[in-house]
Amino acid sequence: MLELRIGPVAHGGHCVARAGAGDDGTGGRVVFVRHALPGELVHAVVTDDPGGAFCRADAVAVLEASPDRVAPSCPWAGPGGCGGCDFQHAGHDAQRALKTTVLREQLARLGADAVTAAGTDLLAVEVEELPGGPLGWRTRVRLAVDDAGVPGLRAHRSHDVCEIGDCPLVPAGALPPVLRQRFRPDSEVDVTVGDDGAARVGSGATVQAAGRTWELSAGTFWQVHPALPDTLAGVVRDWADAPAGGVAWDLYGGVGLLGSVLAGQVGESGTVLVVESAPSAVADGASALADLPQVQFVRGRAEREIARLGPDPDVVVTDPPRAGLGKAAVRDLAARAPRRIVHVACDPAALARDLTLFAAAGYRASALRAFDAFPMTHHLEAAVLLERR
């Protein structure tokens, strides 16, 4: 058992403390502590000790609480329980403040060159609240199934399945009927909650965003927060400024949500290439956007297609996986010299690294917005406008 004074929040849903620190708070071994808040004094139990400079721990008792601490809304979210949430113990405003701190820190530390080159103060960014509040927003959830066929959610950094009775992030009443079922042992179950509030297992869905409707096959990706698709579509509408008759690319485009916005800007005389690797997303997107002749779907991995797509784009929208674009993709994209890039990211560290690469390739970040699209977790969604210098 460790008694720790908790320091700042860090990327990943934990805070930093030091075991054996001096009176001035320096020295000692770094401990990444979950279920704690900055400034608190806690008792913590080490949960993972890989040796070396740091270890991981859970706060199991709070001796001096932060004013931002609240009672968790989920009884399964504490130490040793479900690992899906990171900040159940923090008020909603405090959660967004913690995420803002992490985003700014990652930009300052990993994206310093981009921050310096930016046409605006990127470090003034604030994580914005989305409509709907911190609970009941998750319309899609993947359940893990234990070796007895019981569904649940995984513990933090573990394959162990935590048996739960509900999840407050899912619309009220939707999940318990599924949790009472039994499934193939050691499998996973995809659950979708429809507009009627009912949960469906392994089923597709009908979704609306950007003034359009998509019929999604089972397994086709769609954002889990119901307000995020329209929010991102609005950002692209405001920032992309694709010229009439021009060429726009939607990389990692899924079913073409953001590509549909670009299509409205370039018009029927223009071209929108939506590049996506998932076959079901390509099929669902092509069906939904069949009335837009300017939209063409390209099935393939975007990072491999950038160098061979043609012609050169005026505007590009990118929405890569959590790891970000990376050096090769940024290099190849910059070589095609689009005037504007709207880059969407779901990981602040990857965002900062990509912005540094773009800065070296001749692009400046002229606008940045971030959204609390995953309340109660440490995750966020961000979008940045990059303009060619």
Image (spheres, rainbow, N blue to C red):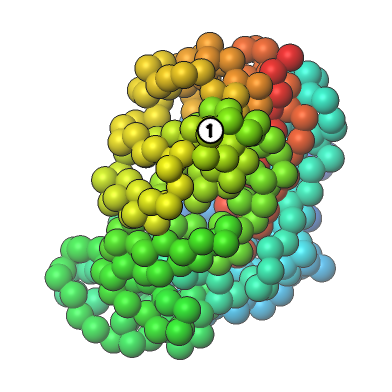
Query: From the viewer's perspective, is residue 380 above or below residue 94?
Result: above
**Can residue 332 be spotted in the picture?**
yes
Left or right: residue 164 compared with residue 15: left
Is 244 or 344 nearer to us in this picture?
A: 244
Q: Position of residue 261 (x, y in %)?
A: 58, 47
Query: Where residue 164 sits: x, y (%)?
Result: 39, 78
Estimate the x, y position of residue 33 in percent, counting from the top left. Answer: 59, 52
Residue under pointer 1 = 270
In terms of image quadrants, where is residue 131? bottom right
| Image position of 183 (left or right of 231) | left
Name the residue type under label 1. Gly
Q: Is residue 286 left or right of residue 258?
A: left
Residue in the image at 39% along x and 56% along y: 288
Residue in view at x 51 percent, y 18 percent: 312
Picture quarter with the C terminus? top right
Q: Residue furthest left?
A: 184
Q: Quadrant of the N terminus?
A: bottom right
Res 27 seen here: no
Residue drawn where x is 37% and y is 80% of the image: 199
Q: Nearer the viewer, residue 219 or 238?
A: 238
SS for dot 1:
loop
| Numbered marks: total | 1
> Which residue lies at the image location 20% right of the left edge and 80% below the top edge?
182
Res 154 quadrant in image:
bottom left
> Which residue occupies the extreme front position in the image?
269
Observer-nearest residue: 336 or 303?
336
